[in-house]
Amino acid sequence: MALKIGIIGLPNVGKSTLFNALTKSHSAEAANYPFCTIDPNIGIVEIPDSRMEKLAKISKSAKKIPAAIEFVDIAGLVKGASEGEGLGNKFLAHIREVDVIIEVVRDFVDSDIQHVSAEPDPAEDVETIGTELILTDLQTLEKRGADFEKRARGGEKGAKIATKLIARIRQNLETEKPARSMKIDDEDETKILKELQLLTAKPLIFTVNVSEENLAKFDAAEFRQQTNLSEDEKVIPISAKIESELAELDEAEAKIFLSDLGLKESSLNRLIHEAYATLDLITFFTSGEKETRAWQLRKNSTAPEAAGKIHTDFERGFIRADVVAYEKLIEAGSESVARERGWIRSEGKNYEVKDGDVCVFKFNV
């Protein structure tokens, strides 16, 4: 299943333009009025990975299959959404379904593009959305807390843990701090937090939509100070306009365009990789004549768990994995040379797969 990322923000901040650039489509309407997006737009985006091409060349693969991310363009949020304003309740329900949130904040002035306020104010935008998500989570805790308290009085151990955790989270939210800012290491509490499906517990990346001339000189530290964000919050500048233009170009033309702007890579690529890393995901590969394929995997996952990404039978009947690091395979130039040099290792059930590992799984069902 593809990693699911929700794009949120106030109306007319560039969400749909960004979504169309990400998915290289025009499936999301980008219009100069609030709520032109009502039902969420969904698109699958391949994760850029330069390693795929080199691996496919070594293996003489017939095709390449990259890992993918599912992006969801969610309707614009307005003040009062937690009380049902605008498309509030519908909007908030869609956020619960995603793994990571990308919050688009507008930081450019354009008289031709309306803003819900008199003019764009990043600090106000961040505060508005943050407040609505916190208020929604407080409502969730009020409903779920009553149930857990009742079960705790009946002596249920898990409910007692949940009741104490909810009290801590509520105190945190009431000081205008998101649930993701809390340090929770206890396994039981982690499980309960996931069950609560709090919006502010989800990983969040702030994507600041700036003008073309301000993209290269954007200062993330200054933006955090301006919007009262902590140093832990991830902030990535992007020009939705530039990215929409890049989406119309082929690879060679895009490189020239980026070079002319003084940029090394597309902001979208950086955003995709940041979202990938936010969930502690790595990429391992399988590569042969039939195909070279990239697979998503949580960090610290074992070889059998990696095998299970390919097929559940592979995990159930796992025997061992032949593993070589991507860099070593490229240096060798072929699987046979890598094997001669002893760079292909036979790993057992306890081996933790590393980013870039190229694997062949042995199994018996």
Image: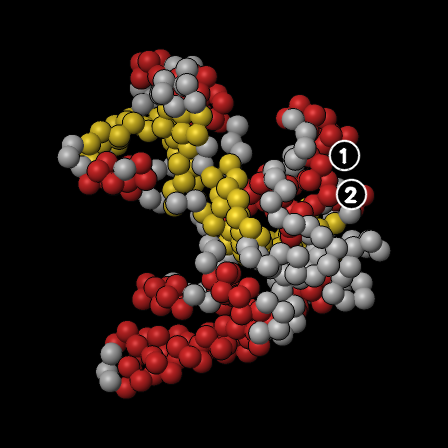
Q: Position of residue 208 (x, y in %)?
A: 68, 52
Q: Which label sits on residue 261? A: 1
Q: Which label sits on residue 212? A: 2
Q: Nearer the viewer, residue 25 or 268?
A: 25
Earlier sequence position, callout 2 versus callout 1: 2
Q: How many marks?
A: 2
Q: Is any part of residue 357 visible from this angle? A: yes
**What element does badge 2 sit on?**
helix
Residue occupying the point 41% across, 18% down: 62
Residue occupying the point 69% across, 40% down: 244
Q: Nearer the viewer, residue 114 or 287?
A: 114
Q: Nearer the viewer, residue 189 or 19?
A: 19
Q: Position of residue 365 (x, y in %)?
A: 15, 35
Residue occupying the point 47% across, 62% down: 96
**Residue furthest out toward the right:** 111
Residue occupying the point 32% across, 75% down: 161
**Residue furthest out toward the left:** 365
Q: Give the distance between the C-alpha atoms of the residues marked 2 and 1, in whole angstroms.
A: 9 Å
Q: Which label sits on residue 327? A: none
Residue type beneath disc 2: Glu
Residue type beneath disc 1: Leu
The reply to whether callout 2 and callout 1 are in contact (CB within 8 Å) is yes
The answer to whether residue 106 is above or below residue 55 is below
